[in-house]
Amino acid sequence: NLSSFVYDVTAKGGNVTFSSENALWIDHSVFPLNAAAHIEVPADGPLAGPWKITLSEPGVADLRLTFKPHGLREDHTHLGLVVSDFVQPFGSFSGSISLTLSDRGRLNLAIVDAYGVCEDHRAVW
């Protein structure tokens, strides 16, 4: 699970230091990541091209993924004070994940066309 702008912790100067929602799930175990994810969505819209997702926590984790959208589900609800704009593309992830595990040392994973979803949700209520 990787996020940007959800439960992010910022340092003086406005730099995001980590997001408390970021974690990797491997072999039924969760590994919290204390670094912020950088998620780059194409400027022309979520289906316009690949998304770039990176995360770097020196000595702990390095993640470099490309998400290729195949389609999306979306909902836009505007009810006065309640606003929800939700876009959830589905597609495939490719790239690499490198993670240091206390009991296994360094784990390097190659990700090739793994099916999944991304989402962009802006809500006011």
Image: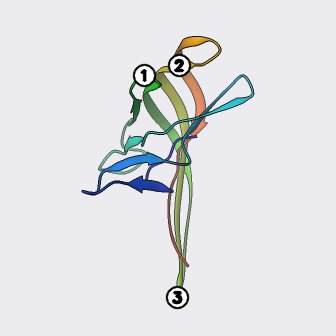
Which of disc 3 and disc 1 is earlier in sequence? 1
Nearer the viewer's eye, disc 1 or disc 3?
Answer: 1
Rendered position, 78 above or below 102: below
Which of the two residues, 117 or 64, is positioned nearer the viewer here? 64
Callout 2, which amino acid? Answer: Thr
**Dot 3 corresponds to which residue?**
80
**Dot 2 corresponds to which residue?**
100
Which of the two residues, 106 or 124, is positioned nearer the viewer here? 106
Q: Residues within 10 Å of mark 1 (few under 14, many from 20)?
A: few
The C terminus, quarter of image? bottom right
Rendered position, 59 above or below 12: above
Q: What residue is shown at x 36% (from left), y 50% (from top)? A: 16
Q: What residue is shown at x 60% (from left), y 35% (from top)? A: 116
Callout 1, which amino acid? Answer: Gly
Outermost residue to the bottom: 80
Nearer the viewer's eye, disc 3 or disc 2?
Answer: 2
Whether pointer 3 and pointer 2 mark residues with C-beta atoms closer than 8 Å, the reply is no
The N terminus, quarter of image? top right
The answer for how far apart the CA atoms under marks 2 and 1 are is 7 Å
The answer for how far apart the CA atoms under marks 3 and 2 are is 47 Å
Whether pointer 1 and pointer 3 mark residues with C-beta atoms closer than 8 Å, the reply is no
Residue 37 x, y percent position in the rendering? 42, 41
Residue 66 x, y percent position in the rendering? 42, 30
Rendered position, 15 above or below 50: below
Which of the two residues, 30 or 92, is positioned nearer the viewer here? 30
The answer for how far apart the CA atoms under marks 1 and 3 are is 47 Å
Whether pointer 2 and pointer 1 mark residues with C-beta atoms closer than 8 Å, the reply is yes
**Dot 1 corresponds to which residue?**
59
Badge 2 element: strand
Callout 3, which amino acid? Answer: Gly
